[in-house]
Image (cartoon, rainbow, N blue to C red):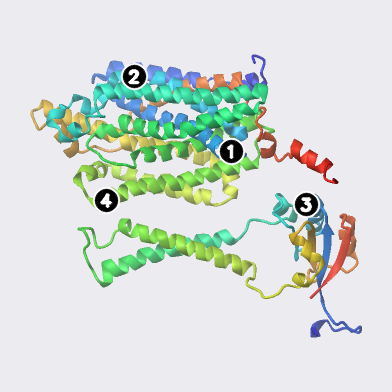
Amino acid sequence: MATAPQTQTSTPVLTRTYGIIAEFDTPADAMHAAEKVRDAGFRKWDVHSPFPVHGMDAAMGLGNSKVGWFSFFGGMAGLTTGMLMIWFMNGFDYKIIVGGKPLFSPLYAFPVSYELTILFASFATLFGMFGLNRLPRLHHPLLRNKTFRQATHDKFYVVIETADPKYSATETRKLLESSGSKHIEMVEE
Amino acid sequence: MASHPNSSVTATWPSWLRNLPMILVALGAIGIVAGLVSIKDHGQQLGYSYLLAYMFFLSICLGGLFLVILHHLFDAMWSVPVRRICEHLAFLLPIMALLFIPIAYLAPQIYPWMSIDAHHDHALKAKSALINQKAFYVVAAILFAIWSLLSYKLRAWSLEQDKTGAAKCTRAMRFHSAWGIFAFALSLTMAAIFWMKSLQHQFFSTMYGVYYFAGSVWLTLFTVYIITLVLKNTGPLKDVVGRRQFYDLGAISFAFTVFYAYIHFSQYFLIWNAAVPEETFWYVLREHGTWWQIGMLLIFGHFLLPFLALLRIDFKMKLAVMGPLCLWAWIMHFCDMSFNITPVLQIFRKAQAAVAAGHGDLSHNMTTMTPDGFAVHPLDLACMAFIGGVLALVFIKYFKAHPAYPQKDPRMAETMGVYIPSSSDISIASGGAK
């Protein structure tokens, strides 16, 4: 039995609600609903679909992904590491002349630094994406919801979390109904 | 199609802009004649200036041809609205064949190997199977024949589809693109070797053709970006070109920024690492005078600046960034071509003077004497204005005579985000209950 000390009120609750889920039959319906939810100013919500829907980012009011910054700084770190490493090893710590070349030159250090740029950039991208998405996680409330299973088949869902400051048990449901959802239910935590 | 709506496209332009190509041609022609009269060097300076401008604009024509071929090979969707621009750019290649006549005529003044006896020059003797006068002219004729045929076929089938909308047009364009990509790669490499690399015939580089190709397509993408933008704002492409096209053009520009740097770095790196004199002399000469700064400019200006500018998604669609960047790309490609061509003129002059004074022989002097530094000769600008003006005149003529974008291309609706159910979809939907 799940306990939720901070939400215990006069009426006894066995489970806390995670959010409200609204089902849509077509990508267009889900997109219009998303636009309404976006315009209503919600923050903690998401749209789930079996396949990527073009234009959904704009409909949800999502900006650019921040992952690019992780890639950029990861790449910069890789380039710097490669250059410094080779300078330290060949030109400083154990000076050695190879093929009549200078002790250090960014030219011969470039292939290795370039590889490290790519390696660090890809690691930063992958783990940056994990971090931003709060991954890995072992469980998500939606996974226990029976209706939600159709999200990988042929239905489209808009889910608004109860934790959203704009959330209201009656108004939010009305909003979703007015956007044409035929099936709305609460999702348990 | 005399009454085509495009015929009035330039009507909204200010008169100075409308007359700009003609003014450029006139100024260029006056400059060239003045140069011919005042500079008594048997047309040597003119030859180099003309070659510089010629290789610069050849980049745009070949780049246009490449983008058309690429479109068909990948069955691309996004590039349908801008394809007609590329087809017109590619079909400037027959004009380039006419504009090649001065180079063919002045070639002995331009290419040192034409005045060197192969019996006294081992490098030239070893390469004489290809690098000889007869081959120079025969190869040029073959190259222009290939380019003219290819660009003509690709554009003619596209214009045919405007009228009929037939699928066989798309198939024909794919067919010509399929053999065309091989012909294109080989012919462009030949052109780069014969017209630019053979200026210093002792040089070896397997990257040279790709190097010219990478810079050419890079320049063309920025040029197409600007042309598309102008045509969208003045009307003809208003309804068919959207954010998608500008974003994708920006994205490929970014890819080619990196590709160019990769190719040029590889050429330099391998030569630097191997340290074989037959190859290093080409770069060693270009470290003299201000050519060293131009080399640095190519690293930081041709690569790093556009690289950083194009990293961001939104910058690719901002005129405030892309407008100056397109102009910058033109300057950078000019510097790149000048880096290849102009030092040879400076060396060639010194080498000829030394031979006349009885010092050394020409082939030895050509690898040991050093250039002065980066300089833009007035004739360079005159030739740029002349060739650019002629090509602009022809391009505008093409553009006015034909629809601004492929009218009945099967991918047109898709690129505009319109979904048209195919007949097979409809039959499934109606027969689904069975």
What residue type is disc 3 on?
Answer: Pro
For the residues bearing labels 2 and 3, Cβ distance under 8 angstroms: no
Q: Residues within 10 Å of mark 3 (few under 14, many from 20)?
A: many
Apparent side of residue B409 relative to residue B310 in the rendered image (left or right): right
The residue identified by callout 3 is A27
- Residue B121 x, y percent position in the rendering: 15, 32
In front of the other: B166 or B390? B166
In front of the other: B392 or A30? A30
Task: Assign the N terminus of chain B to one quadrant of the image.
Answer: top right
Q: Earlier in the sequence, mark 2 or mark 1?
A: 1
Badges 4 and 1, same chain: yes
Apparent side of residue B302 relative to residue B274 in the rendered image (left or right): right
Task: Assign the C terminus of chain B to one quadrant of the image.
Answer: top right
The residue identified by callout 2 is B102
Q: Residue at the location (24% across, 19% down)?
A: B42
Where is B38 relative to B305, above or below?
A: above
Give the mark toward the camera: 2 or 3.
3
Where is B182 relative to B150, above or below?
A: below
Q: Earlier in the sequence, mark 2 or mark 4?
A: 2
The chain to which mark 2 is attached is B
Q: Earlier in the sequence, mark 4 or mark 1?
A: 1
Badges 2 and 4, same chain: yes
The residue identified by callout 4 is B272
The chain to which mark 4 is attached is B
- Residue B155 x, y percent position in the rendering: 55, 25
The residue identified by callout 1 is B75
Residue A172 visible within the image = no
